[in-house]
Amino acid sequence: MVTFLFTFILMASIGVITMFDLYLYEETLLSILDANIFFEKGTSQWMLYVNLLFGFFYGMVVDYRFRKSKKSSKSS
Amino acid sequence: MKNILVEKLSLWQLFILIFIFEIGNAAVVSTGNDANQDAWIAIGLAMVFGMGLALMYYFMLSRLPGKNLFEIFQFCFGKWMGGLLTLLYILYFLYIASRVLRDFCELIVSFIFEETPIEFIAITMVIVIVYMLYLGLEVMGRTSEVFMPYFFSFIIIIGIAVFISGEMEFENLFPILGDGFKPVLKAVFPQLLTFPFGELIAFTMIIPYTSKFKKAKKITLLAVMASGIMLIYNAVLQITTLGVDMRARSNFPLLSSAREISLLEFIERVDLVVVFIVMFGIIIKVSVFFYGALKGLELISNRPYRMYVVPIGAIIAFISVKISDNFAEHIEEGLIVVPLFMHVPFQLLLPLMILPVLLWKTRKSKEGRK
């Protein structure tokens, strides 16, 4: 659930900022999406993606542990 | 629901949180520019309307004591529709948290760490906020309690120091209402009303957890008034020190004003004091919005919000950088898009639409009980 909601919120947030960029700037949807989803080479934006990956894996670990504890409480 | 803790805030902590939250980034970026030299009047007027808004939010919460805004949605519209509204508010809270964080990051990379990537500042700040929220709402309350005296006294001292330095020109405040009342009203609606006063909507997620809910109304109003007075003080300081044009042009007018301080040719460059004020204000503001979003996720997924702190913190850092390419874009979005598509619907329209349904439903449930 944590991983799912993480992915959902991330996509929805990117959707929100893309909509605002579309409203403000005369650019195509694809170019805005490209700028919002991928990182520019040669910048330090990779840090954000590493951070996101960490968040994603953290979510997976939390979900796994939650499931495990649920299973063990059911069996006992 | 598993391991969901009930956290309580004291009334004093609530007061401090609202006070710091309201000043937060409003002290950094210039507010009420449309009103020119009458910006302080516009802020005063917005404060009065802001108190009205706070009253409305409290009224909604008082219909179902102990329940936060998202629980009210579920009470009014059921699980699915209430869940959808909650999701929209989660996105709103996270978006605003990212914007507030970006304000601080821009300030830091413009004035203090010029060589440091903005991404690094964003991630570092988020780590601090994540840690604080992971420890809970009470820790946030206690942290703000500890730093409040510094926060308050530094703002006051900056004004006094600029005054003693002889950099204040009170003629800049005149003519009062020289262009009539129209520019003042233009500054109030929707900008000043929604930022910072309308942002109190985030406190609908915190007020229900105060130790004495009945007294929270008075405390909220007092805090809004105190922060409004502090913002007026700030505006007067900026206008008298920089003048109307410079204030409007400056990205961070409080910082520019503080740079004018020169006491005994010894105490100069007190930028760090302003950075402290801003940093703390922004930590609290981002935390409050972040907490609001986390409570929403807790309600939707039926799992403790602490599970989401780290992953959602990563999203806030990501969005705060991706939100715009530069500061000019960031401010443009903040002035054009955000009030129209974010603040007005989420702070005013939706609560106003929900209010009659809430009144009807609570009356119905009371009659049912009788």
Image (cartoon, coloured by chain):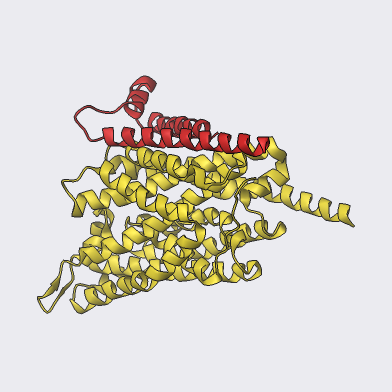
Chain colours: A red, B yellow
Asked whether B71 or A72 is in front, the reply is: A72
Where is residue A35? Give x, y as percent.
32, 27
Query: In the figure, is residue B84 to the left or right of B362?
Result: left
Q: Give the answer, above or below, for where B110 lies relative to B142.
A: above
Asked whether B228 or B84 is in front, the reply is: B84
Quarter holding residue B181: bottom left
Query: In the figure, is residue B33 to the left or right of B257?
Result: right
Q: How many marks?
A: 0
Where is residue B253? Give x, y as percent.
27, 59
Quadrant (top left, top right, bottom left, bottom right) of the C terminus of chain A: top right
Quarter holding residue B215: bottom right
Which residue lies most toward the front here?
A76
Which residue lies most toward the right here?
B370
Camera sees residue B152: yes
Query: In the figure, is residue B91 to the left or right of B168?
Result: right
Query: In the figure, is residue A3 to the left or right of B155?
Result: right
Asked whether B145 or B34 is in front, the reply is: B145
Point 22% across, 27% down: residue: A41
